[in-house]
Each structure stands twice: as C-alpha cells, then as structure tokens.
Image (tube, rainbow, N blue to C red):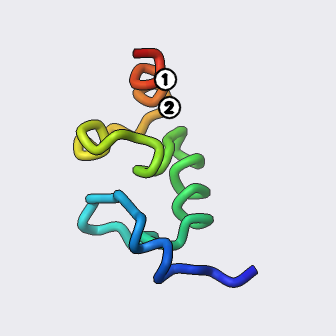
Amino acid sequence: MECKKPENLENCPCTYPGCNKKGICCECLKDHLSRRELPACCFPPEVEKTYDRSIERFIQVMSK
C-alpha cells in the first residue's frame, strides 16, 4: 500500500513540534499504541494541545 503522506499532512492535527511521524499514520499509530496512547487525531483540539494522549484521557473525553 502506498503512503499518502502529503494528503495525510493536510489533515494531521498533531501540534507536537518534534514529531517525525506526522503524516505517516501507520507509524504514528504504532508508536502511540506501544505507549498506551492514541494519536492526536483521536482528540479534540483543546485536549490534543495538552499532549496527554493517554487512553485514559481518551475515555474521559469520550464519556462526557
């Protein structure tokens, strides 16, 4: 499968300046899941900016 990085970058909400996986969704997801986190695209902007990407925070946000 061909990576659509340019397309993905147009929609990537990640605000972390040092992210080297921006636009490479499969690597981003794999990296976050290995740390019991979810990527920025799973969170609303106000939560994403806190960089708390934990699954626990996701559950909190989704249960409101």
Q: Which mark is residue 55?
A: 2
Left or right, 15 with respect to 41, comes to: left
Q: Pick out the residue farthest to the right.
A: 1
Judged from the image, the secondary structure of the residue bearing numbered disc 1 is: helix
Q: Residue 18, percent across and down?
A: 28, 68
Left or right, 59 with respect to 10, comes to: right
Q: Residue 39, percent across and down?
A: 47, 50
Image quarter in which the N terminus is found:
bottom right
**Quadrant housing residue 64:** top left
Task: State how far apart marks 2 and 1 are (Cα).
Answer: 6 Å
Identify the residue position indicated by label 1 in the image. Answer: 59
Tell me the crowding category of disc 2: few under 14, some 14 to 19, or many 20 or more residues within 10 angstroms, Cα based.
some
Left or right, 10 with respect to 1, comes to: left
Tell me the crowding category of disc 1: few under 14, some 14 to 19, or many 20 or more residues within 10 angstroms, Cα based.
few
The answer to whether 50 is drawn above or below residue 61 in the figure is: below
Q: Residue 17, percent across and down?
A: 24, 66
Residue at 46%, 24% in the rendered image: 62
| Labelled pair 2, 1 in contact (Cβ < 8 Å) | yes
Three-letter code for the amino acid on which mark 1 is drawn = Ile
As rendered, which of 38 and 35 lies closer to the eye?
38
